Image (cartoon, helix red, strand yellow):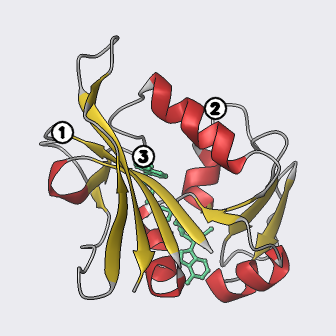
């Protein structure tokens, strides 16, 4: 199972239920990697999607409220159930903070967009990526998002 995440300085990934940054090339990469595959997310991240389930992907939502149902998505009661329901080697955990923390010990590969910006009012964080457990296997050049001026780069880690 893979994790895909955009992380700003100090591990910040969210504020007020939303992502701190929307970078066009990051969204494009997210779509290219996940389309045709399975995505797993927490109920809060699913409910923040502006148009509901993401198209052309199998959407699995983790919730303790097993009576809930979501259009275009399946539900699972925890991360282990979600992974076994997915039964797909090309599965991506797409957030948010609670689900990343539970998925990180189970993941084999991390697709990280590093965002070189502070998020002073962040309320959601990605756990530390421990260099004893994770090897940096790819690191792209730093790029600049034209719309926001924010610097970012794509990196990958594989479990050692
Ligand atoms: N930067 C990025 O790449 C990125 C990506 C995605 C999201 N985000 C950000 O992350 C934030 C949302 O993260 P979050 O931590 O608040 O929420 P979340 O992880 O998206 O969802 C939390 C929900 O997942 C369910 N859940 C969590 N652990 C569970 C367990 N062990 N068993 C069953 N269900 C479980 C619960 O749903 P119920 O309450 O229904 O039981 C819980 O309320 C937002 O700010 C969002 O923008 C950032």
Q: Distance between the residues labelled 1 and 2?
A: 25 Å
31 vs 85, nearest the viewer: 31
User: At numbered mark 2, what does the secondary structure look like: helix, strand or loop?
Assistant: loop
Identify the residue position indicated by label 1 in the image: 116
**Residue lying furthest top:** 147
* Residue 35 in picture, x, y percent from top left: 76, 45
Q: How far apart are marks 3 and 2 (CA)?
A: 12 Å
Identify the residue position indicated by label 3 in the image: 17
Callout 3–callout 1 Cβ contact below 8 Å:
no
Which of label 1 and label 2 is nearer to you? 1
* Residue 105 in picture, x, y percent from top left: 45, 87
Write the residue at 81% across / 49% down: 57
The answer to which image quadrant residue 81 occupies is bottom right
Instruction: In the rendered view, tell whether residue 3 sits above or below residue 35.
Output: below
Instruction: In the rendered view, tell whether residue 12 sits above or below residue 129.
Output: above
| Quadrant where the N terminus is found in the figure | bottom right
Which of label 3 and label 1 is nearer to you? 1
What is the number of the mark on residue 50? 2
Mark 3 and mark 2 lie on one chain; the one further toward the N terminus is 3
51 vs 82, nearest the viewer: 82
Instruction: Report whether the residue tagged 3 is closer than 8 Å to ligand 1.
Output: yes
* Residue 34 in picture, x, y percent from top left: 69, 49
Write the residue at 32% across / 37% down: 20
């Amino acid at each position: 199972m893979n994790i895909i995440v955009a992380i700003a300085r100090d591990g910040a990934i969210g504020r007020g239920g939303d992502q701190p940054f929307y970078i066009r090339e990051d969204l494009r990469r997210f779509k290219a990697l996940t389309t045709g595959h399975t995505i797993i997310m927490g109920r809060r991240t699913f409910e923040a999607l502006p148009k509901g389930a993401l198209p052309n992907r199998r959407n699995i939502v983790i919730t303790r409220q097993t009576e809930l149902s979501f259009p275009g998505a399946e539900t699972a009661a925890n991360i282990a159930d979600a992974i076994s329901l997915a039964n797909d080697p090309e599965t991506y955990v797409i957030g948010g903070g609670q689900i990343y923390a539970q998925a990180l010990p189970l993941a084999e590969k991390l697709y990280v967009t590093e965002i070189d910006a502070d998020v002073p009012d962040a309320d959601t964080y990605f756990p530390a990526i421990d260099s004893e457990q994770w090897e940096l296997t790819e690191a792209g050049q730093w790029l600049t998002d034209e719309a926001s001026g924010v610097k970012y780069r794509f990196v990958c880690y594989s479990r050692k």
